């Protein structure tokens, strides 16, 4: 049985797109009607991008976990909901059917309640990729607590910042996490963060690695012991808490071009409708298939396409604890073979890194269960696209290049697998409900093509159900970040090209946000971290093309401390960034300079630094407006 809103041909895509633009309220009401509601909405949509205010399915009452779990119990209780593959391939994988997952979510929801957590509370989740992470997320949603998952690669300081920003009083974590041959001491990182966050009342700790941890009486409790307490009372069937369509479901922190990461807020109903609709249509999911999204649940891709989208659709979602290159570079291919995976959704950076190992790791791996391949997170270069297509998809699996953002909840521009055409390196056509507009610096629509393409900054003109609603605790920041650059438009921060077929190619960020291995990192954030290092006077960070990561981090640093061993200082600065943000933000290159190219008004000319970092030495553009044009020569000569 296919899904009522599944688009089955190009003609149907065109019709759906047209209907979604001409009668958005009717279109989305029809989709929303296929979900389970406690009470139907009063009004489908109310919005303006001025404030901004976006409300979908206003007055509707529901709980997203009843859509992810309960409603599948009648017909598909024994369908696997989650198949979990551990880090170590010699250990057993685990399967949780919808019945089992439902049981465990209700059980853990009871644990949360017993620990004083209730609707509206913010719960920070800092765990490895174990099934309990999905259970924790869903248990929060079941009782209406707002989860804020923090990726395991962030530092204690980053966690403390997020705990404070969200005033999160509760934490769910693991003693440790396995990633390849490493063991990451998550609880001990949490302990460091909590030195600054005395307001945290409870820390629930799952035993995964049984690494020694400190457990503070009254604050820290073991997951298993709490579950046993619930079991001894017979796991009372905790009814899901009734939520308003526009109640927050979660906060997810993401980097912008200025300041600290902001807490993007998604609300229950719109997020549910958008992730499910896009999951079913982009991947053309067929019931019974196994969907393998390789992202970490610490990022939006994991939220939307490991947990909520697939589970709402009653799909089987494969969750992998480890990394693609351990114990060897054939790990993904082993998993596909072992679990007969049908859909593989991964990042260009992973593809490029695996390409580097050649074809040996593919030998003897059966990949013929694959039907659809997907990419997300950054532009995919044609070489990687063709390698993926020929060696993994054997030229018979459509590749969906899905463009979207943390703020958009799910895919906005993407081909639909096997239904709409693909073009290597191009995200192609907008999904129903998505109305792109390409503007120039002034905000005027670009209508004239240059070299065959319309080029400019990508904006969206109307809300789709999954658009972010606010940034936690600071609505004004949401307005200035996304809705102020151009009046009445949502500005994505991305540049793009549009060809004569109306296909879009996203070319990368046009703001000061880097995309390193598909992870978003603000240059300002990295600069702040570098500047905290003693002896650093000032720094400027830019991205440069990196063969595997897509972009690497290049820091120009003015240093006048006492230590004279520059190699040592370089290491010290790297360690400082790791401590302040996390290993994902480590600069790949640091160049010590005596000054930075600044305009007379004191603004750093990043354009020049970017060109130097890219290896461009000639066409640096106009440098005459610089305070000290001579500095450019010095920086050029000292490039690392
Ligand atoms: C980039 C990840 C090109 C883009 C889902 C965007 C892409 C940022 C693509 C969001 C793609 C994502 N082609 N670029 N298919 N997908 N991006 O919030 O710059 O981690 O703005 O969300 O990744 O990153 P985020």
Image (spheres, grey):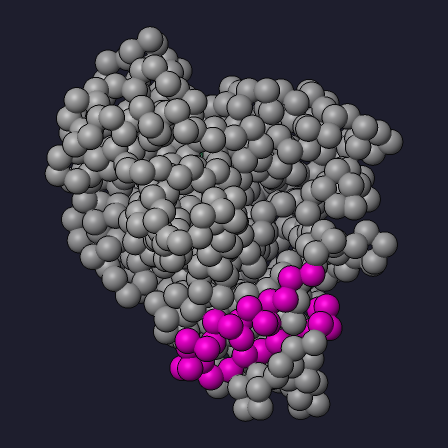
The residue sitting at the top extreme is 451
Residue drawn at x 30%, y 54% as measured from the top left: 259
- Residue 151 in the image: above or below residue 216: above
Q: Is residue 282 visible?
A: no
Say which quarter of the image contains residue 120.
bottom left
Say which quarter of the image contains residue 366.
top right
Residue drawn at x 34%, y 44% as measured from the top left: 558
Coordinates of residue 309 in the picture (x, y in percent)? 53, 51
Residue drawn at x 18%, y 44% as measured from the top left: 484
Coordinates of residue 141 in the picture (x, y in percent)? 49, 68
Question: Which range of residues does the magenta coloring cover?
Answer: 183-211
- Residue 112 in the image: above or below residue 336: below
Of residues 454 and 34, which is closer to you in this image? 454
Of residues 156 and 62, which is closer to you in this image? 156
Of residues 494 and 76, which is closer to you in this image? 494
Coordinates of residue 31 in the picture (x, y in percent)? 44, 47
- Residue 117 in the image: above or below residue 284: below
Residue drawn at x 22%, y 51% as measured from the top left: 479
Task: Answer left or right for 190 relative to 52.
Answer: right
Q: Is residue 292 visible?
A: yes
Coordinates of residue 68 in the picture (x, y in percent)? 56, 60
Which quarter of the figure is the N terminus placed in? top right
The number of numbered badges drawn on the structure is 0
Residue 290 lies in the magenta stretch: no
């Amino acid at each position: 049985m296919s899904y009522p809103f599944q688009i089955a041909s190009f003609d149907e895509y065109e019709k759906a797109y047209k209907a979604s633009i001409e009668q958005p309220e009717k279109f989305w009401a029809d989709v929303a009607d296929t979900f389970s509601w406690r009470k139907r909405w009063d009004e489908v949509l109310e919005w303006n991008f001025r404030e901004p205010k976006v409300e979908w399915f206003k007055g509707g009452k529901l709980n997203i976990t009843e859509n992810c779990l309960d409603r599948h119990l009648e017909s598909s209780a024994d369908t696997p909901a989650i198949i979990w593959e551990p880090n170590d391939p010699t250990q057993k994988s685990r399967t949780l059917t919808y019945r089992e997952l439902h049981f465990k979510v209700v059980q853990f929801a009871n644990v949360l309640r017993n620990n004083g957590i209730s609707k509206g509370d913010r719960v920070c989740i800092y765990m490895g990729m174990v099934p309990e992470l999905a259970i924790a997320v869903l248990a929060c949603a079941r009782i209406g607590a707002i989860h804020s998952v923090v990726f395991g690669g962030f530092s204690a300081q980053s966690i403390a910042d997020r705990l404070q920003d969200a005033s999160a009083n509760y934490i769910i974590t693991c003693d440790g996490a396995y990633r390849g041959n490493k063991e990451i001491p998550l609880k001990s990182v949490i302990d460091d963060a909590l030195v600054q966050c005395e307001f945290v009342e409870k820390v629930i700790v799952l035993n995964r690695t049984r690494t020694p941890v400190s457990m503070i009486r009254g604050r820290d409790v073991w997951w298993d012991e709490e579950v046993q307490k619930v079991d001894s009372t017979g796991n009372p069937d905790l009814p899901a808490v009734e939520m308003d369509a526009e109640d927050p479901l979660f906060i997810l922190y993401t980097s912008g071009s200025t300041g600290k990461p902001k807490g993007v807020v998604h609300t229950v109903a719109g997020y549910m409708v958008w992730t499910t609709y896009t999951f079913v249509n982009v991947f053309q999911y067929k019931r019974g298939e196994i969907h393998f999204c390789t992202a970490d649940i610490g990022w939006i891709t994991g939220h939307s396409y490991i947990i909520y989208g697939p589970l709402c659709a009653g799909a089987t979602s494969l969750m992998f604890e480890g990394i693609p290159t351990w114990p060897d570079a054939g790990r993904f291919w082993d998993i596909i073979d072992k679990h007969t995976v049908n859909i593989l959704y991964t990042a260009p950076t992973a593809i490029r890194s695996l390409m580097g190992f050649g074809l040996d790791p593919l030998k003897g791996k059966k990949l013929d269960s694959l039907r659809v391949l997907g990419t997300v997170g950054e532009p995919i270069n044609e070489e990687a696209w063709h390698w993926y297509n020929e060696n993994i998809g054997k030229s018979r699996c459509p590749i969906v290049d899905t463009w979207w953002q943390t703020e958009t909840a799910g895919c906005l521009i993407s081909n639909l697998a096997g239904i709409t055409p693909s073009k290597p390196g191009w995200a192609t056509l907008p999904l129903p409900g998505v109305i792109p507009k390409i503007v120039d610096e002034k905000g005027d629509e670009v209508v004239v093509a240059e070299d065959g393409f319309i080029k400019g900054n990508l904006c969206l003109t109307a809300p789709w159900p999954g658009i972010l609603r606010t940034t936690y605790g600071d609505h004004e920041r949401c307005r200035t970040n996304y809705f102020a650059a151009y009046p009445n438009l949502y500005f994505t921060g991305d540049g793009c090209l549009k060809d004569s077929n109306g296909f879009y190619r996203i070319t990368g960020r046009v703001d000061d946000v880097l995309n390193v291995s598909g992870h978003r990192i603000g240059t300002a954030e990295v600069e702040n971290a570098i500047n905290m290092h003693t002896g650093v006077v000032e720094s400027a960070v830019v991205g440069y093309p990196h063969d595997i990561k897509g972009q690497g981090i290049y820091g120009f640093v003015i240093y006048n401390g006492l230590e004279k061993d520059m190699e040592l200082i370089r290491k010290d600065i790297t360690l400082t960034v790791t401590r302040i943000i996390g290993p994902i933000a480590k600069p790949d290159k640091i160049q010590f300079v005596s000054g930075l190219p600044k305009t007379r008004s004191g603004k750093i000319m990043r354009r020049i630094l970017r060109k130097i970092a890219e290896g461009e030495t000639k066409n640096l553009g106009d440098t005459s407006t610089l305070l000290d044009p001579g500095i450019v020569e010095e920086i050029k000569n000292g490039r690392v």
